[in-house]
Structures are given as structure tokens and as C-alpha cells.
């Protein structure tokens, strides 16, 4: 089940849908005077709407047996929805090696942006110096001072992003596994020494 949780969950949901529809039809077939629930399609509609927690109210159970089936179907629908979310989250989660590759690609991109921002700092600083030296309009000096400050701000943001990337590289689970492995190795070494 751990390998193919999505297939097992789908099979359980379809089987539950069919069984609940048949049971609801069997409970309600002779209870209603109007025979609204006499066919299987109406029962399937009610079970599907109850399973998905929508409940339009166009078809409703008349017997206690039918009401019980609808309540159980609603509870199972909420539980299956939670399981579907958990299965999809596990499928979309990156493995350790995929996460390392992803972090490496992001780190390379951040490093490229950092070098570009550093070049912009040098360029803007040189132009501020040049325009101040030749006595140009204050407009040019302020323009390149703004660019210089913007580049400095950009490089600070990039460095902060790189620090966050390094901090998130090792998760708590990996640290816990490493600590458990280390303590097991220490116990083995102590046993050998004794």
C-alpha cells in the first residue's frame, strides 16, 4: 500500500461508492411513497453528493437506515478527502537528492544575480565619482546614486536569500536521523572498548 497509495485509495473510494449506493437503494426502496429512491441512479447521486460534502438536498433519506448510510458516507468522504490530500502531498514532495539539485540550481542563479549586482555597484559608483569630479548636473549624480543604492539593496537581498537557502538545506528530520546514527555508533564503540 505504501508504494501505490493512490491506486488503493481510488479503489477503496469507488468500492465504497458502489456499496453505499446499493445499500442506500436497498434501505429506501420501499420506504418512500413517491418512490424517488427506487432506482440506483438516484441513490448514486445522493451518495456522491454526500461523499463530496456538498449535500444539495434534492434527494434525502426517509428511513433511519438510509440516514445512517448518509452519515457514514459523509464521514468517510471527509476521511478520504484528507487521505487524498496526504497522498498528493507525498507525491509532490521532493526527495533528498531532488531537493539538493533544486537548491544547487537556485544557488547558482543567486550567485549569478549577486555578481551582476556587484558589477552594477561598481558601475554606478564609478559614474557617481565621474559626474561629481567633472561637476556635472546634480540630476546625473542623484540618478546614479539611486542606482548605486538600489544595487546595494539588491545584493543584500540576494545574500539573505542565500543564507535562507543554506539554513533550509538540512531539515530537522535529517538532523534527527544523523543524531540517532551518531548515538548508535557511540554505543557500539563503547561496547567494543569494554
Image (spheres, grey):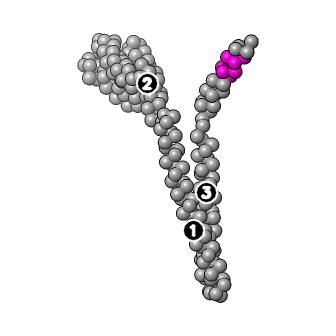
In front: mark 3 or mark 2?
Answer: 3
Q: Are the residues tagged 2 and 1 within 8 Å (C-beta)? A: no
Q: CA distance from mark 3 to mark 2?
A: 43 Å
Q: Nearer the viewer, residue 13 or 7?
A: 7
- Reply above or below: 26 against 167: above
Q: Secondary structure at mark 2?
A: helix
Quarter occupied by the C terminus: top right
Residue span colored magenta: 183-190
Question: x, y (%) of residue 139?
Answer: 61, 82
- Reply above or below: 112 against 73: below
Determine if residue 17 is in view.
no
The residue positioned 31% from the left and 21% from the top of the image is: 43
- Which label number is shown at residue 64? none
Quarter occupied by the N terminus: top left
| Crowd rating for badge 2 (residues with CA inside 10 Å; few <14, some 14–19, many 20+) | some
Residue for badge 3: 157
Residue for badge 2: 80
Q: CA distance from mark 3 to mark 1?
A: 15 Å
Question: x, y (%) of residue 179?
Answer: 66, 27
The mark that comes first in sequence, 3 or 2, is 2
- Which label number is shown at residue 120? 1
**Residue 16 horizontal side relative to residue 138, left or right:** left
| Crowd rating for badge 3 (residues with CA inside 10 Å; few <14, some 14–19, many 20+) | some
Q: Secondary structure at mark 1?
A: helix
Q: Are the residues tagged 3 and 2 within 8 Å (C-beta)? A: no
The residue positioned 59% from the left and 51% from the top of the image is: 161
- Reply above or below: 159 against 100: below
Amino acid at each position: 500500500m505504501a508504494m501505490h497509495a493512490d491506486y488503493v485509495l481510488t479503489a477503496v473510494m469507488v468500492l465504497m461508492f458502489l456499496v453505499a449506493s446499493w445499500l442506500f437503494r436497498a434501505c429506501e426502496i420501499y420506504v418512500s411513497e413517491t418512490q424517488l429512491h427506487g432506482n440506483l441512479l438516484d441513490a448514486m447521486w445522493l451518495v456522491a453528493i454526500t461523499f463530496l460534502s456538498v449535500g444539495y438536498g434534492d434527494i434525502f433519506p426517509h428511513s433511519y437506515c438510509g440516514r445512517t448510510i448518509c452519515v457514514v458516507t459523509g464521514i468517510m468522504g471527509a476521511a478520504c478527502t484528507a487521505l487524498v490530500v496526504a497522498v498528493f502531498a507525498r507525491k509532490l514532495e521532493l526527495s533528498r537528492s531532488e531537493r539538493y539539485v533544486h537548491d544547487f540550481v537556485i544557488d547558482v542563479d543567486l550567485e549569478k544575480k549577486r555578481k551582476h549586482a556587484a558589477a552594477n555597484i561598481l558601475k554606478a559608483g564609478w559614474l557617481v565619482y565621474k559626474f561629481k569630479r567633472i561637476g556635472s548636473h546634480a540630476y546625473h549624480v542623484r540618478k546614479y546614486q539611486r542606482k548605486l543604492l538600489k544595487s546595494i539593496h539588491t545584493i543584500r537581498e540576494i545574500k539573505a536569500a542565500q543564507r535562507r537557502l543554506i539554513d533550509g538545506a538540512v531539515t530537522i528530520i535529517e538532523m534527527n536521523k544523523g543524531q540517532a546514527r551518531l548515538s548508535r555508533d557511540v554505543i557500539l564503540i563503547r561496547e567494543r572498548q569494554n
